[in-house]
Image: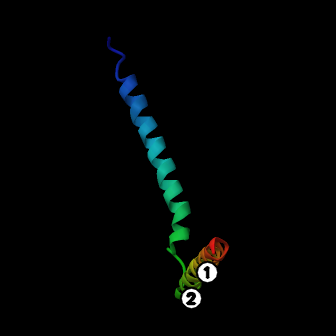
Amino acid sequence: MNNKGRGSGLALIMMLIVALIVAWLVMTQMGGFGFGKTEEQQEQMQEQAVDSAQDAVDALNQKMEEAVQTDE
């Protein structure tokens, strides 16, 4: 069953296409990690993350206090 290398060539082309798609996805998503941003932009992102986390903790604490008050 000799197909003159067509199967392996097709497999190589498919692997290259997949590698290019993965590389493109990685490059488009790198901005979310702070790559290519100024220090000021990175600090703002960190502050927003801290504020979001604090809001979540505050909401959780409030719900826990409400649950304790309803149990009494």
From the viewer's perspective, tell me whether residue 2 is left or right of residue 17: left
Residue found at the far front of this picture:
72
Q: Are marks 2 and 1 in contact (CB under 8 Å)?
A: no
Residue 72: percent from the left, percent from the top? Answer: 63, 75
Tell me the residue that label 2 is attached to: 40
Q: Quadrant of residue 58?
A: bottom right
Residue 40: percent from the left, percent from the top? Answer: 56, 88
Residue 13: percent from the left, percent from the top? Answer: 44, 36
Q: CA distance from mark 2 to mark 1?
A: 27 Å
> Residue shown at 54%/82% (left/top)?
46
From the viewer's perspective, tell me whether residue 68 is left or right of residue 10: right
10 Å crowding of disc 2: few (<14), some (14-19), many (20+): few
> Residue shown at 59%/85% (left/top)?
44
- Seen in the picture, residue 70 relative to 44 is either above or below; the reply is above
From the viewer's perspective, tell me whether residue 54 is left or right of residue 13: right
Is disc 2 placed on a helix, strand or loop? helix
Residue 35: percent from the left, percent from the top? Answer: 49, 74
What amino acid is at disc 1? Answer: Asp
Lower sequence index among marks 2 and 1? 2
10 Å crowding of disc 1: few (<14), some (14-19), many (20+): few
Tell me the residue that label 1 is attached to: 58
Q: Report the front residue among 53 and 29.
A: 53
> Residue shown at 43%/42% (left/top)?
16
- Seen in the picture, residue 33 relative to 10 is either above or below; the reply is below
